[in-house]
Amino acid sequence: MLQQVNGHSSGSDAQGGKSLREDLQEFLGGEALLHELDDLTKVNPVTLETVLRCLQARYAADMFYTSAGCTLVALNPFKPVPQLYSPALMREYHAAPQPQKLRPHIFAVGEQTYRNVQSLIEPVNQSIIVSGESGAGKTWTSRCLMKFYAVVAASPTSLESHKIAERIEQRILNSNPVMEAFGNACTLRNNNSSRFGKFIQLQLNSAQQMTGAAVQTYLLEKTRVTCQASSERNFHIFYQICKGASVDERLQWHLPEGASFSWLPNPERTLEEDCFQVTREAMLHLGIDIPTQNNIFQVRRKGIPLTFGRCDGQPLS
Ligand SMILES: Nc1ncnc2c1ncn2[C@@H]1O[C@H](COP(=O)(O)OP(=O)(O)OP(=O)(O)O)[C@@H](O)[C@H]1O
């Protein structure tokens, strides 16, 4: 049903102008070129149908980013598109005199923000809000932005400062697997769904080089530890420990090979997120040594109330 949108009415215009229906027909008549509309502000008339048809045409043409004024609409390709995130493309957006004139991309947003920090009078803080429904690609997009800044905000001249910058970049990137292991879970909508919100702050010095990062997390879905919807799973870390612990660790942590736990449903699902080794290495790079890691994993086990027990009726310890 056509509704009044932007001053257009669904019937004929009394002043002799075209009706919304005619506008729509004219707009959709040029469907072959819809994918070329890289900014939704160029869509006319603006209706749910025209906007969706435009995004659909761009999606079909493998164009996953579309501007909407100063907002960027990102569609989840649900397939690997490596050329869309290559370091060469990062450098292209970084070097462009006007990145906004290139094709819409998360790197254009990243670069514009990076340039905005350095105003003529004093540095100005910048914020990027990544929002969308579960599975839309927020975590992916945040990761892309962090990788982008790790590349563009690291061009120090001296070898020593280069090493410092490299270490910071690596730590920033390594924070992702750790946060995802402890805060993400497989849900019906997303195999790697973040069950918490996060505020990531990247810090730059006066030369625009990355000097540090801080992550604040909030609203962790703690109830998932004890209660999961059917066909969903607990936090990745529990499965990682159960699947990836060595024989010695199993003995120390009282995790017999093949034991199943009622609070760890659907363990048979094998996800790429189940890799314990990746989490351990990332923790090591963040400065969490092996004894501390072991303490954390023991706390994890002991922190689970005994009432959950094992499926085979044995107590946890
Ligand atoms: N740009 C992209 N290119 C390729 N794959 C993508 C892209 N964006 C998202 N995906 C795929 O979609 C999946 C879901 O994306 P992501 O985890 O980022 O969603 P989300 O919005 O953070 O969801 P949630 O709110 O549940 O945490 C990813 O694991 C990845 O496989």
Image (cartoon, grey):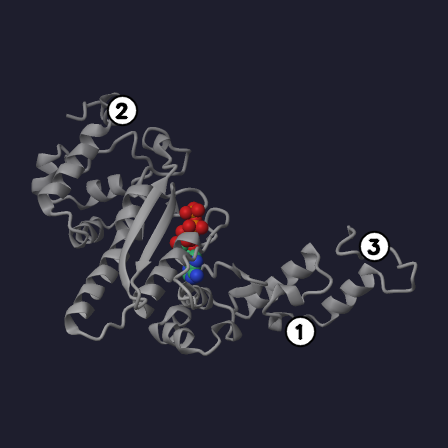
The residue identified by callout 3 is: 10
Say which element carries label 3: loop
Q: Is residue 271 above or below residue 302?
A: below
Which residue is drawn at the image coordinates 35% and 66% (left, top)?
148
Q: Classify 10 Å Cα crowding around label 2: few (below 14), some (14-19), many (20 and above).
A: some
Q: Residues within 10 Å of mark 1 (few under 14, many from 20)?
A: few
Res 315 label: none
Q: Residues within 10 Å of mark 3 (few under 14, many from 20)?
A: some
**Tags 2 and 1 touching, CB below 8 Å:** no
| Amino acid under disc 3 | Ser
Whether residue 296 can be seen here: yes
Q: Residue 306 at x, y = what percent?
A: 22, 22
The answer for how far apart the CA atoms under marks 2 and 1 are is 58 Å
The image's mark for residue 308 is 2
Say left or right for 133 vs 54. Answer: left
Q: Secondary structure at mark 1?
A: helix
Alpha carbon distance from label 2 to label 3: 60 Å
Q: Nearer the viewer, residue 56 or 258?
A: 56
Residue 79, given in percent of the width and then of the height, sits at 43, 62
Q: On screen, 245 above or below 136?
A: above
Q: Position of residue 3 (x, y in %)?
A: 78, 51
| Quarter of the figure with the C terminus | top left
Q: Residue placed at 19% from the left, 23% from the top?
A: 314
Tell me which image quadrant ligand 1 sits in.
bottom left
Q: Earlier in the sequence, mark 2 or mark 3?
A: 3
**Residue at which label 1 appears:** 32
Task: Return the x and y of residue 19 as percentages of the image width and height.
Answer: 84, 61
Above or below: residue 64 compared with residue 227? below
Residue type indicated by callout 1:
Ala
- Give the alpha-carbon distance from disc 1 to disc 3, as whole Å: 25 Å
| Of the pair 222 and 108, the residue shown nearer to us | 108
Amino acid of disc 2: Phe
